[in-house]
Image (cartoon, rainbow, N blue to C red):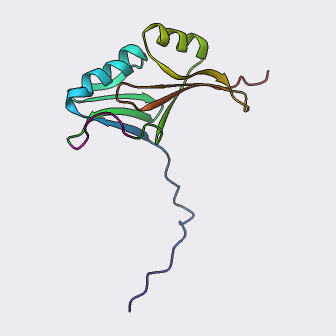
Amino acid sequence: MSRAPPARTRPLSEKPPVPAGVIIWTEASRFDTLAAFYTDTLGLQPISSRPGHVAFAHGSFRLTIGVHNEVQGRATDPLRVMINLAVQDISSTSGRLAAQGVPFLRTPELEPWGGWIATLCDPDGNTIQLLQLPQEPT
């Protein structure tokens, strides 16, 4: 009977993985609506765009929306993954989105850690949280 090799620890010279991005997959018939929500409604600026693909970036982190032939319909478990988008003024941003007809699951609320959170969904039902981080003490 063979045994599993012993677990190895990471060599000191190897750095741990770092988050590089998130991909939101959707079906082809829903792509244009979803891409328009992120660009036109939320106001994110694409760094690349082609049929069935749009990407946004902040530093080296990417948020990508793409078409996948094995994805159909809206998200069936929208709370499994939440996309956090940092904003400078959560009242202004949430007010602008509400005026555009975006429904909120949670209007802006102050959190015990000092920041503010508001929660909404994109057209595919993926959960998005707007975060206003606490101000640094001066």
Q: Is residue 89 visible?
A: no
* Residue located at (73% from left, 31% from top): 112
Residue 132 vertical position relative to residue 82 in the rendered view, above or below: above
Q: Residue at x 72, y 28 (%)?
A: 114
Where residue 71 appears, as percent x and y from the top left, is 26, 40
Give 99 or 85, whichever is nearer the viewer.
Answer: 99
Is the C terminus in the top left, top right, bottom left or bottom right quadrant? top right
Which residue: 39% across, 89% down? 2
Relative to 81, 9 lies left or right: right
Please tell me whether residue 8 is drawn above or below residue 58 in the rendered image.
below
Farthest residue, direction top = 99
Residue drawn at 40 percent across, 25 percent down: 122
The picture places residue 101, in percent across and down from the top left corner, at: 42, 11
Q: Is residue 57 left or right of residue 105?
A: left
Q: Splitting the image into 4 quarters, where does residue 67 fall?
A: top left
Q: From where the camera sits, is residue 119 visible?
A: yes
| Number of marks | 0
Q: Is residue 57 left or right of residue 109?
A: left
Give the magenta-colored segment's residue range.
70-76
Q: Main secondary structure of the magenta part?
A: loop
Q: Position of residue 123 (x, y in %)?
A: 35, 24
- Name the quadrant of the N terminus: bottom left
Residue 72 found in image quarter = top left
* Rendered view: 24 above or below 49: below
Residue 97 horizontal/vertical position (percent): 47, 13
Q: Residue furthest right?
A: 138
Instruction: Decide whether residue 89 is among the magenta residues.
Output: no
